Image: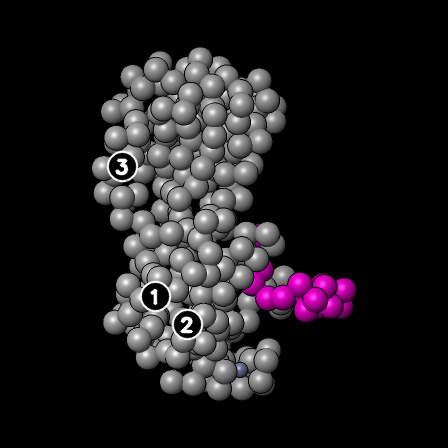
Amino acid sequence: MPEGPEIRRAADRVAAVLEGRVAEDVFFAFDRLAHRADELRGRTVTRVETRGKAMLTWFDDDLAVYTHNQLYGRWFVRKRAGFPKTGRSLRFAVHTDAGAALLYSASEIEVLDRAGLRAHPFLAKLGPDPLDRATTARVIRVQLERFRRRRLGALYLDQAFLAGVGNYLRSEILFEAGVHPDRRPMDLSPDERASLARATNLIVRRAYQTGGVTTEAARVRDLEAAGQPRRAYRHYVFGRAGRACRRCGETIEKTEAAGRRLYLCPSCQAA
Ligand SMILES: [Zn+2]
């Protein structure tokens, strides 16, 4: 499933053809939404916003189309007329004079006003999003305090704790902070909690800037220059079971937390 940084990058592409422009045509595939297309046509797309893994496309600042890609949804952005060659089914489309934003395969699509957004069961319980500038390390420390009894491995997938963090970010953040996923915030020293809060923002924001690469830029440059493929430098631990830790040389282990695979270095992240 795409995580917060991937959705934010998709939102940037969508915004490039929609934001500040009149929606000349709007299409919904689902019958339950078809009548809303008439309501949105002719309005201006004022903003394309993300909240964790959800996207909000705002029309005249008072109606938003809420979309969640889940596993299968995929955005295509076109600068010219026409549709991409794909076997997927088109679910939502907005056309402007700059191009078209086309959402395929997604099933979670709703049109909401502000009251509807506040009452939305998924959005209403979302925690702060590390891609939001207002989510400082201090905000994350407060969240760690709120959820202090939860094991970090499960906590980091809980969207009520932090919005947008998913499976690869979870492993990478815990490695960057040097904490074992079985520990709870209450088990950490104040320094460890501060370091975990910083690592959270660092890794999520880096993944947004790089398009999903979580390792540091200098290493990426070296390995890219040496002709290595992206998978050779993309992550510290995620997907690297049996390989050497990039920091200490110990063998990376694969385990499971909250039903999903998790990777860690047993030496850098001692239990
Ligand atoms: Zn290590």
Q: CA distance from mark 1 to mark 2?
A: 8 Å
- Residue hosting label 3: 118
Q: CA distance from mark 1 to mark 3?
A: 24 Å
Expressed as whole percent of the image width and height from the top left, the position of residue 53 reads 40, 47
Q: Residue at x 40, y 35 (%)?
A: 56
Tell me if 1 is positioned left or right of 212 in this view: left
The stretch of residues the image draws in magenta is 211-228
Q: Nearer the viewer, residue 236 or 146?
A: 146
Q: Are marks 1 and 3 in contact (CB under 8 Å)?
A: no
Q: Nearer the viewer, residue 76 or 87?
A: 76
Q: Residue at x 49, y 65 (%)?
A: 198
Q: Nearer the viewer, residue 80 or 250?
A: 250
Disc 1 residue type?
A: Leu
Disc 3 residue type?
A: Arg
Disc 2 residue type?
A: Arg
Q: Secondary structure at mark 2?
A: helix
Q: Which is more N-terminal, label 2 or label 1? A: 1
Tell me if 246 is positioned left or right of 135 in this view: right
Give neighbour class at mark 2: few <14, some 14-19, many 20+ (Cα, 10 Å): many
Expressed as whole percent of the image width and height from the top left, the position of residue 135 reads 44, 53
Eyeballing the image, is 254 above or below 28?
below
- Residue hosting label 1: 144
Question: Please, which colouring scheme is shown?
Answer: one colour
In this rendering, does residue 160 appear at all?
A: yes
- Residue hosting label 2: 193
